[in-house]
Amino acid sequence: MIDTHMTGFFNKTLALLIPLIFFLSAGTFGQSQDYPEANRKKLVNIQEDIAMVVGYQQHHYGFGEVGLAWKAYISGLRHHYSAVQLAVSNEFSTKKWGERDNNTIWGLKAGAWVDGAVAMGINLIHYTDFDKSAMAFRPEFGLGWNGQFRLVYGYNIRFWDGGVKGLNGHAFSLILMPNIYNISKKVKTKSYGPNYH
């Protein structure tokens, strides 16, 4: 019989290693050393926006999510694009599940993300049922596009468990982030090639 403590340790370790592997390998995607010209110049668009965060996560329990995010989007690079997001949001569930003490669970969440087809991020979440509370660290990875949406898998690593029932140990999440306000938009010229320093 496999020891349940070892299984839990393995799952938590795997949840940390997989995003790290993706992060380290993301820089190698699509790289090419083929420069038909000595130097190239390309226009790079840099855009900053405020966006709404609307999402849903599901495993044993369903949670909605609403919040705001700051996004920086860079396009026109050699490889494709990249986007960075910082968000503050709330996860919530109001359904009465059998093992819950209260109907409502509220989770204040702060997260940081990068995406460029592959999305990776980290989140810190404080959950409460307005009687007890818990704190979790959640690494997530999956698919992301243009800072507009993410479809990701995440694993909640609870480092402070105050006895809140009805939380997911891990879950799949779909997050939409439509822009609501443009902060700035810049166009720069980027040079690259074997003779560019």
Image (cartoon, grey):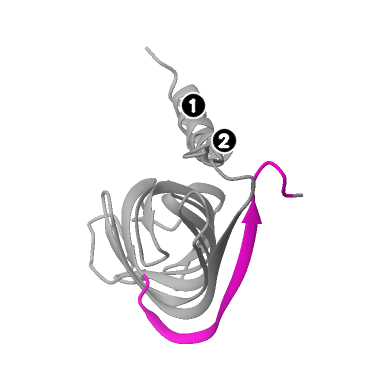
Q: Residue drawn 62% across and 67% down?
A: 189
Tell whether 117 sits left or right of 88: left
Q: Amino acid at mark 2?
A: Gln
Q: Which residue is mark 1?
A: 10
Question: Of 6 and 119, which appears nearest the observer?
Answer: 119
Question: Of 146 and 20, which appears nearest the observer?
Answer: 146
Query: In the image, is residue 128 part of the stretch drawn in magenta?
Result: no
Query: In the image, is residue 180 part of the stretch drawn in magenta?
Result: yes
Pointer 1: residues within 10 angstroms few (<14), some, or many (20+)? few
**Which region shows up in magenta?**
177-196
Pointer 2: residues within 10 angstroms few (<14), some, or many (20+)? few
Q: Position of residue 23 (x, y in %)?
A: 55, 41
Q: Which residue is mark 2?
A: 33
Q: Amino acid at mark 1?
A: Phe
Residue 9 lies, with reference to residue 52, above or below; the image says above
Q: Position of residue 191 (x, y in %)?
A: 65, 57
Question: Of 117 and 100, which appears nearest the observer?
Answer: 117
**Residue 64 falls in which quadrant of the image?**
bottom left
> For the image shown, how many numbered marks are present on the structure?
2
> Magenta span: helix, strand or loop, mainly?
strand
**Residue 104 falls in which quadrant of the image?**
bottom left
Residue at the farthest top position: 1
Q: Position of residue 44 (x, y in %)?
A: 55, 66
Q: Position of residue 182 (x, y in %)?
A: 48, 85
Mark 1 to mark 2: distance in Å? 39 Å
Residue 87 is at least partly visible in this image: yes
Q: Secondary structure at mark 2?
A: loop
Question: Of 113 and 4, which appears nearest the observer?
Answer: 113
**Residue 91 falls in which quadrant of the image?**
bottom left
Q: Secondary structure at mark 1?
A: helix
Front of the two marks 1 and 2: 2
